Image (cartoon, rainbow, N blue to C red):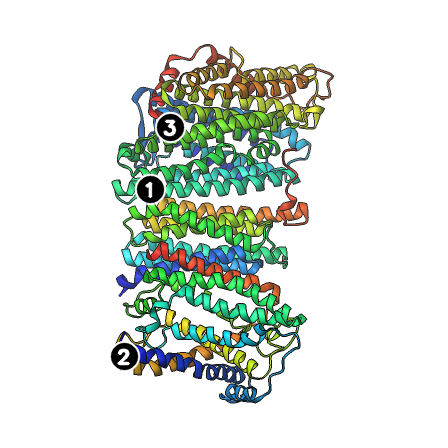
Amino acid sequence: MSAAGIAAQFAELALAVLLAPLLTGWVNQCRAWLQNKSAPGILQPYRVLAKLFQKEVILAHNASPLFRSAPYLIFGSLALSAAIVPTLGTDLPLNEAADAIALVGLLALARLFIALAAMDVGTAFGTLGARREMMVGFLAEPALLMVFFTASLISHSTSLSTIVAAIAHRELVIYPSMAFAGVAFVMVSLAENARIPIDNPATHLELTMIHEAMVLEYSGRHLALIEWAASLKLFVHMCIGLALFFPFGIAGGGDWLGLVLALPALAAKLAVGGAALALIEMLSAKMRIFRAPEFLGTAFLLAVLAMLVHVMLEG
Amino acid sequence: MLQHFGPQVINLLAAVLLLLAFAMLSQRRILSLINLFAAQGFVLFLSTALVAALTDQKHLYVSAAVTLVLKVTLLPWILHRLIRRLNVKWDVETLINIPTTMLVGILLVILAFNLAAPISQLAGTVTRSTLGIALASMLLSFMMMITRSKAVPQVIGFLSMENGLFFAATAAVYGMPMVVELGVALDVLVAALILGIFIFEIRERFDTLDTRHLEKLKEH
Amino acid sequence: MPIELLALLLSPLAGSAVLALVGHRPRAAEVNAVFSSLSFAAAAVLVARVIESGPLVALGEQLFVDSLNVFLVALTAFVAMTTSFFSRPYMRVERDHRRVTGPGMRLYHSMYQLFSFTMLLVLTTNNLGVMWVAMEAATLTTVLLVALYRTHASLEAAWKYFILCGVGIAQALFGTILVYFAAEKVLGPGTGSLLWTHLDAVKTELQPTVMSIAFVFLLVGYGTKVGLVPLHNWLPDAHAEGPTPISAVLSGLLLNVALYALIRCKVITDGALERPFASALLMGFGLVSVVVAAFFLSRQRDVKRMFAYSSIEHMGLITFAFGMGGPVASFAGLLHMTVHSLTKSAIFFTAGHAAQQTGTQLMENIRGLAQVTPTVGWGLMLGTVAILGMPPFGVFASEFLILTTTIAVQPWAAPVLLLSLGVSFAAIFGKVQPLVFGEPTAARLPHPPALVPVFTHLALVLMLGLFIPPSLADWYRQAARLIG
């Protein structure tokens, strides 16, 4: 572990927490542009957060301590997952914990708490949202794991930094398996982050909403934390995608210069990724909720095929 | 450059072929099915031509040309004409639901890979690793033939099974001798024509193309 | 290239072309018979030559005739000829009944010759790839023939036949690719690596794993055409719904030829593998076919369908015999191929006439054939007695040899075989007896039925039961040695 590594670790965590709303703002702005609307400004998510933090928290009478602690737990587990994804450098102090399966576990933990909190107050919408969220999660998680397994088969390790290091520092080889896994990963990420075609983050239509249905009872700083965590989740997913499929510019161990150069590289990749996400959302239509299993089933199939193709063609 | 990236591109094409086989298995609409079949033929053409360029096998260029003419142009054209004349605009439906089909498909792929593994180890071709994929896409088309109840998708299944076999021949042995390959192509073409006529006859007699109505003949 | 080999193949091919033009004319049936007779004459000359001077290859080694296939060539050409004699009056009645139209007759005659050509090509080709192509072509021609009447049932049967055999034959192509793959390692790329004579010369050097996988695919592929259980579903429908001459050639020729292809592949596989892998598979499939077919027999109501199941049973028995291997079992298998082909086609001839006389194929509506047309009735009875393995017919001799070898080599299978043969005896005899005797429901036919082929076949079967000519026996022995 080097000084550069420790610096990279702190820089990553700080960047993730601070820049996540900016990424959300950027995606919203791109989408507004594509739809020929006037954009709300890239800093709008920060303004929303600031407003919510100033507001008073209103709790239901029958809310349990779980309901109050859930936002902190959710934010915490997502912040931790942001810390273990190698975005700037691969030589991180948290490497020991940075296992792909652990990462999926952390994301699942956040999901579990948000679903529990949604059911805690006992409103109809909360339960409905929680049920839908668990259905999506139940289908998306195996697919996400399969994507990670494909990557680990290539690099012979489940440790995230080893995977990224192995993929980044290798001569250019075409991996059909990674192409499949990439598509699967994008599909899973769309579902996990409640984007179109699975959910629409911009509406409160009771027939279709998932994420928004779960957080209807939250207010004030609790809601701010949950919204922040949602941005963080998008940020984490995008960073995982970039690290696995476009790992260029990520610094190796003890490389200060690389670390400094990794920052603009990451920013550029995130900007492109955000724009691509906005484009995908623009081009697809929201699916009926009953079609979601089919969508995620396809993602799972692709991920499994990626693994099989790797075994057959690249083994 | 070609020698370095050629085999990798062939692997990529093989992977795309497998993906197309799954897409066909899950495709509900008859028109898209025909387009997927044409796409499969085109991928086959690309990979055959690439193998020909890599290995300098003259007869493979001929096979690639035959593929382009027969499987990318002629057969899809016949199929398009067929459904236009039959005026079938309905969606294709499957006998068992799609997720189950997919899972069985994955199992078939695993089976095919296991079966092909000892063979590809012995092969000396640059394309040897794609043999499993060829066998897998053949088995997937085979499954498509079984799970579909309409006549046209069954025919497409039959034709795409032939595609899988053709790819297997290219992968394992750089294609069969010319006589055989041309003979097979002729058989496929004739079969497609006969089936086309048959589909008309069946429609005439039964007023439907659902082959589930074809079950008068069974053991009582 | 010997002229008779050329004539053997070209006469049906030319016949197909000619009949495609004139097949609907009144005299087309005679033309059909002439072309079939020509090809049989060529086959007879070919047999004489092979007996005299041994195996021959021709056309740049693409064609090959040895003791194994020459007798099948003769048998095929012979049955194709007698069936063409039979089809003349039979199809005339069908046309009078308006079941077939003029264009239908043209298709029928042309496809009949093309089918004979593909059969003979499968038998004489030396190239495993061409063998596959010809087999697929045979499927296509017979699909058209089975669907000739354009009724619901015949279309359904043809569709089922096509889909099942299409799937099956695709597996055989994969098997052929694998054989080529194994051979290419030894013989180098090119057509030479698919030639059976070359493969046979180097069979011990072929990669065993590849050959065993290849054989499984070939067995599934060609086994579908042989009608081995559980790949037999197409067979009863195709036999029952097609025109009777086609049922006769399907049972008498196509099944034999598919089995021949399988045996050729078995010889190569056995050479490559040290364990009796192919034999075990053949025995297993054969035995299952015998048992399943025997138990399905008693449930049949359609006369042609019942005899189709009997064909499955007999093909199973022959497959089992070749699976056991050894000089006696292979000899018996070859003999059984011959007598089954002759007897079964004779039975279909008479059953077809019986169906025409009563206007139905349902056995409960066919009664008293012997009273109305004694020749048809007695022909059916004698054929049935022959196919059930009663002495002194040839089927008895071959079944007896197969059973005694089974008791000696695979004693566990003997009770199963005996039981199945007993069950099928009871089923068939019980059903055929009232057809022949009893209150007549049949009417006379407007044309005299052609029963010369029936009694010629039965006479030959009888002769083979009493006495096998030394040259024929010699020939079987050579072929049996080849099969191993």
> What kind of residue is marked 2?
Ala
Mark 3 → mark 1, Cα distance in angstroms: 30 Å
Q: Chain of mark 2?
A: A
- As drawn, is C86 to the left or to the right of C318? right
Q: Which residue is mark 1?
A: C180
Quadrant where the N terminus of chain A is found in the figure: bottom left
Question: Picture coordinates of residue A6 (x, y %)?
Answer: 31, 78
> What kind of residue is marked 1?
Tyr
- Which of discs 1 and 2 lies nearer the camera? The answer is 2
Q: Residue A117, which numbered label?
A: none
Q: Which residue is at a point 47% across and 52% down the rendered structure image?
A: B106
* Among the 4 quarters of the image, the one containing residue C484: top left
Secondary element under disc 2, as helix, strand or loop, is helix
Above or below, B72 against C46 in this view is: below
Q: Chain of mark 3?
A: C
For mark 3, does the 10 Å Cα neighbourhood hold few (<14), some (14 to 19), or many (20 or more) residues?
Answer: many
Q: Which residue is mark 2?
A: A3
Q: Nearer the viewer, residue C238 or A96?
A: A96
> What kind of residue is marked 3?
Glu
For mark 2, does the 10 Å Cα neighbourhood hold few (<14), some (14 to 19), or many (20 or more) residues?
Answer: some
Q: Which residue is mark 3?
A: C4
For mark 1, does the 10 Å Cα neighbourhood hold few (<14), some (14 to 19), or many (20 or more) residues?
Answer: many
Q: Residue furthest front?
A: A65
Quadrant where the C terminus of chain A is found in the figure: bottom left
Mark 2 → mark 3, Cα distance in angstroms: 92 Å
Q: Chain of mark 1?
A: C
Q: Nearer the viewer, residue C152 or C396?
A: C396
Badges 3 and 1, same chain:
yes
Cβ atoms under marks 1 and 2 closer than 8 Å: no
